[in-house]
Amino acid sequence: MKRTNIWNIGRTLFLFSGLLFLSGCGGGGPSSSAPEVVCNGDTRSTNETPSATQLTVYQSTCQGAVNEPVVTLTICVPNSTNCENVSNILVDLGSTGLRLSHTLAISSSLPQESENGGLITECYGFVSGYNYGPVVTASVTLGNQSVTVPVQISNSSLSAPSSCTTSSTGNISSAPFEPYINGILGLLFPQDDSLDGQYYEGGSGPTTISSSLEVQNPVFLLPTSESNGVLLSGFPTVSTTQGASASTVSGLLTFGTGTASGLTQLTTNSSATITASYNKQTLKAFFDTGSNGWFIDNPNIPTCTSSSLQGFFCGTAPTQSAILTGTTTGSSVTLNFSIENAQTLFNTGNQDFSSLGGPMSGFFDAGFPAFLYGYTIGVGWDPATVNTTDEGYFLYGK
Amino acid sequence: MKTNRRIVFLLLGIFLSLSLGLPANVRAGLDGNQTQIREDAQKLGLVPGPASTQNGYSTVTLSLPASSPQSMGGRKTLTVREFSDAGGTIFAVAWEGSLPPDLSVLLGDRFSSVPKKNSSPYRHQLFLRTPDLRVRVIGTARFRAGKAWIPSRLPPGFNPDQIRVQAP
């Protein structure tokens, strides 16, 4: 018993050492001497049987991440048989476009885009930090369809332009993918990422590049019936008190929302947010597989005091309910969920938690835990208007 | 000998406090004073609203005018709220919107304590904890909300949960 506890504590520290402490090293560029630690995890085997328009989603096999849904994508050099099956690509409803780690073997073979005589690079800002690197062209297989799409290579060993690293663009830190993920599949609308990224030609910029060369959500390039959004479904209902082991948590990513009958459409504004009514407050809300918890406004739930659990709730709130409403139409859905003590959850040694959460004033971020209650959740758009309005919708239902 | 050393330290101390106190070097945001909020707003392209005084602290909300080029006709948003204590010193800031604010303005001199590399596995959250600075940011690539505060400077009875862009 004692041994188990020590093991669990050690494991928790290991799992969260990367999460909670920003590394103090590095200046503009990374240390050149330190060898890069990469994710060596393979595709997890599951019982899923994806159709021609689906991919299996599994819990990451990279080290140290919980509530991290990923897919394996076949990435090829366009018009060649030079391909690589890349595991552990984060399924992200909160960003736009496909990004791959420079440490992958295929990355150095993918042809870099150029315009006006200059090779194209991009700086893309996530909340956790920026990624800088070349924009290349890749053929990506989504279900049984292959699309050729501009993709960013995140290369933290390159020195990023000062306009990328300076705080005026909101960037704070560099946030390399390694060793936690091999890439990010950003499935949010609109089609390209020009709202969030800065482009450079031959190192000069930021500048405007042709929109066809901008990094894009590859779903927009699929045949019409599959290009209007995605659904995430089939994940198990996970115990709110114990969580679940990674080997038991998988689901399906469906391209196209054509089978979305029975789902409620919640229209977003141009910032891709909707509204939550929760704990007697009106909050800005969104669904996001790239958030690992319910980050919500509830001052009544105690937060963790231990620095290794910073950012999470350490209180228990078993019967929570929020009403999520679309921005322009009145349709709404009710989410019933639980919050469990993060320490209790991590002590189980599991990797997927439906009740992991943390405080955020004014917000209702329904992160990956929201996908572990047996509901189908999706993001969609009208391909004819989304690129001028930046507005789309979330889908929710059984 | 000891006296000499004391004098050297005294002079060094005076020099440091003078150089830190010179207006040209003053950065507002955290540790700044109320009068600098207007300068913060200007640097961020925002317009300050009136000060609102609560129990032991006051706040000013900085908004992005719809006419600003940054707003792209209303497609981009940014709102910032700065919190100052009874002595007028800024101890907390909150922000939200689709435009990320320049944190070197909002965090003031404490921005330099933010590491240049983040080794977290999670892309949509940033939790920073140093002995005298807390930063929390949550959001997608399209919309984010954040707050930063100096734990030792919170007024008596003030809870970090009160650091928010909109009063509940």
Image (cartoon, coloured by chain):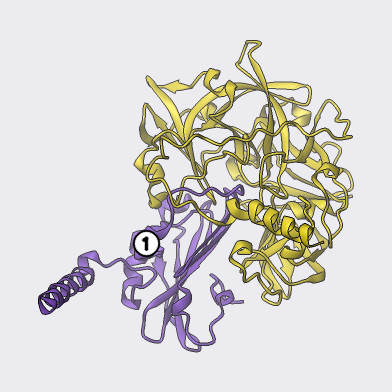
Q: Is residue A170 left or right of residue A81?
A: left
Residue A279 in percent (x, y) is at 73, 74
Q: Is residue A128 left or right of residue A225?
A: left
Q: Quadrant of residue A277?
A: bottom right
How many callouts does the rendering have?
A: 1
Residue A382 in percent (x, y) is at 70, 39
Residue A109 in percent (x, y) is at 54, 17
Drawing shade for chain B? purple
The answer to whether A356 is drawn above or below residue A199 in the figure is below
Drawing shade for chain A? yellow
Front one among A301 and B40: A301
Q: Quadrant of residue A295?
A: bottom right
Q: Quick check: can you spot residue A330?
A: no
Front one among A132 and A4: A4
Q: Amino acid at mark 1?
A: Val
Q: Secondary structure at mark 1?
A: helix
Front one among A336 and B39: A336
Residue corresponding to mark 1 = B105
The answer to whether A34 is drawn above or below residue A283 in the figure is above
Residue drawn 58% across the image and 51% down it: A18
